[in-house]
Image: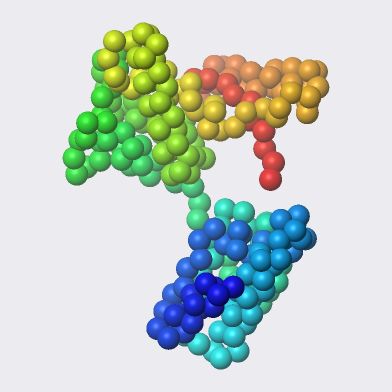
């Protein structure tokens, strides 16, 4: 709580200003969660933040408070009441053009310079087309997802050289394609779904891939992954 008070006091002294709290869900989690129930310190931090937000409102101070989170559903309801953080702005994941730009940065091909990281499989003749393909496949990825994808793909390429699968350090098409399903998320652990359910889901997903072969103009299926969706 002391650090929280210092943060808000500094903002009040420098008003008008913008106060930004990243990972806001960890600072003001729902008070019904187990972590909140078991931690008196976390409860104290949450109560302090809420009381200071209320102070800003009551004193009508020229302060804009921004809470950043990917887990809005985990925020305490009191934080979202009118007069507090009652305006939600959704920042969508990047579109294809943005994903291309992000990929170029993490592949070492930004407009400013070409770095030593930009070493690709000699079989990749057209790097621009290769990046376009990856951007197409990674629809729905965030910038962090793309960074994680390239990082894990590079780790995979290093192990491929160490294990003697290739003689030189370079990033291959398969390094990235085989890493994408890991970033997307795997099926739940064994025992959570029956074998029959997994089989049905696999048939369903394979059907999407097969349908894309039958419809003219449909994007080609490069791989099929079964992804679990939940909160």
Identity of the residue drawn at 40% across and 32% down: 150
Residue 227 placement: quadrant: top right
Relative to 193, 226 lies left or right: left
**In front: 40, or 18?**
40
Image quarter in which the C terminus is found: top right
Where does the image place residue 200, in percent across and percent down from the top left? 75, 20
**In front: 47, or 87?**
47
Relative to 110, 70 lies left or right: right
Q: In the displayed image of the protein, which residue is found farthest to the bottom?
A: 59
Relative to 163, 4 lies left or right: right
Residue 230 placement: quadrant: top right
Q: In the displayed image of the protein, which residue is found farthest to the left?
A: 113
Identity of the residue drawn at 30% across and 20% down: 170
**In front: 121, or 2?**
2
Identity of the residue drawn at 27% across and 14% down: 168
- Would residue 124 be seen by someone viewing this image from the given angle? no
Relative to 94, 79 lies left or right: right
Where does the image place residue 192, in percent across and percent down from the top left? 78, 28
Identity of the residue drawn at 42% across and 22% down: 156
Give the number of marks: 0
Where does the image place residue 125, in percent across and percent down from the top left? 26, 18
Residue 38 placement: quadrant: bottom right
**In front: 67, or 229?**
67
């Amino acid at each position: 709580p002391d650090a929280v008070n210092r943060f808000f006091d500094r903002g009040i002294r420098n008003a008008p200003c913008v106060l930004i709290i990243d990972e806001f869900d960890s600072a003001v989690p729902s008070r019904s969660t187990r972590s909140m129930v078991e931690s008196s310190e976390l409860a104290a931090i949450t109560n302090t933040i809420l009381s200071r937000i209320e102070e800003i409102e009551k004193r009508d101070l020229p302060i804009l408070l921004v809470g950043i989170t990917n887990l809005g559903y985990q925020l305490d309801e009191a934080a979202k009441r009118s007069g507090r953080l009652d305006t939600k702005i959704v920042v969508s994941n990047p579109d294809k053009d943005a994903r291309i730009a992000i990929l170029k940065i993490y592949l070492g091909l930004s407009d400013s310079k070409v770095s030593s990281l930009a070493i690709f499989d000699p079989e990749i003749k057209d790097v621009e087309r290769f990046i376009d393909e990856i951007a197409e496949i990674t629809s729905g990825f965030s910038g962090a997802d793309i960074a994680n994808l390239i990082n894990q793909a590079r780790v995979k390429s290093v192990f491929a050289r160490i294990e003697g699968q290739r003689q030189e350090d370079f990033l291959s098409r398969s390094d990235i394609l085989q890493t994408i399903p890991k970033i997307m998320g795997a099926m739940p652990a064994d025992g959570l779904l029956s074998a029959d359910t997994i089989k049905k889901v696999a048939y369903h997903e394979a059907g999407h891939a097969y349908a894309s072969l039958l419809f003219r103009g449909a994007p080609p299926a490069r791989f099929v992954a079964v992804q679990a969706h939940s909160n």
